[in-house]
Image (tube, rainbow, N blue to C red):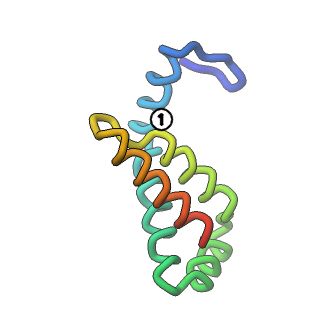
């Protein structure tokens, strides 16, 4: 088990990330992705309003999406990874 503040080696980073995905990070990333995508379709103010009503934070959503963008692309070409990462970062700039 990894404790808060513990320094992880390179091999443990991947294992820890996979455990976090299994523990719910994947669903959280998906929800954040949908929120960012929806807000870029013209209803940004409403998405922010709902997020604020529920005690959410735009800063947290951006952090989760940046982490998601950094981990994109297992098994995909480098071109695809970079294009998708850029697309997500562009969406975040407008969020």
Query: In the picture provided, is 95 more to the left or to the right than 88?
Result: right
Q: Residue at x 49, y 69 (%)?
A: 35
Task: Characterize the local packing of mark 1: few (<14), some (14-19) or many (20 or more) Cα atoms within 10 angstroms.
Answer: few
Q: Is residue 6 above or below residue 29?
A: above
Q: Residue at x 62, y 66 (%)?
A: 93
Q: Residue at x 44, y 30 (%)?
A: 19
Q: Secondary structure at mark 1?
A: helix
Count of picture labels: 1
Query: In the picture provided, is 19 more to the left or to the right than 47?
Result: left
Q: Is residue 39 above or below residue 14?
A: below
Q: Quadrant of the C terminus?
A: bottom right
Residue 64, horizontal then vertical, whole percent: 57, 50
Query: In the picture provided, is 13 more to the left or to the right than 45?
Result: left
Q: Is residue 57 above or below residue 28?
A: below
Residue that numbered label 1 is attached to: 20
Q: Residue at x 49, y 48 (%)?
A: 69
């Amino acid at each position: 088990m990894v404790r808060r503040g513990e320094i992880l080696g390179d091999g443990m980073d991947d294992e820890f990330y996979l455990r976090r995905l299994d523990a719910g990070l994947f669903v959280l990333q998906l929800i954040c992705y949908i929120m960012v995508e929806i807000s870029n379709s013209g209803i940004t103010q409403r998405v922010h309003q709902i997020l604020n009503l529920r005690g959410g934070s735009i800063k947290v959503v951006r952090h989760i999406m940046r982490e998601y963008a950094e981990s994109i692309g297992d098994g995909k070409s480098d071109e695809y990874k970079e294009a998708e990462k850029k697309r997500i970062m562009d969406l975040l700039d407008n969020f």
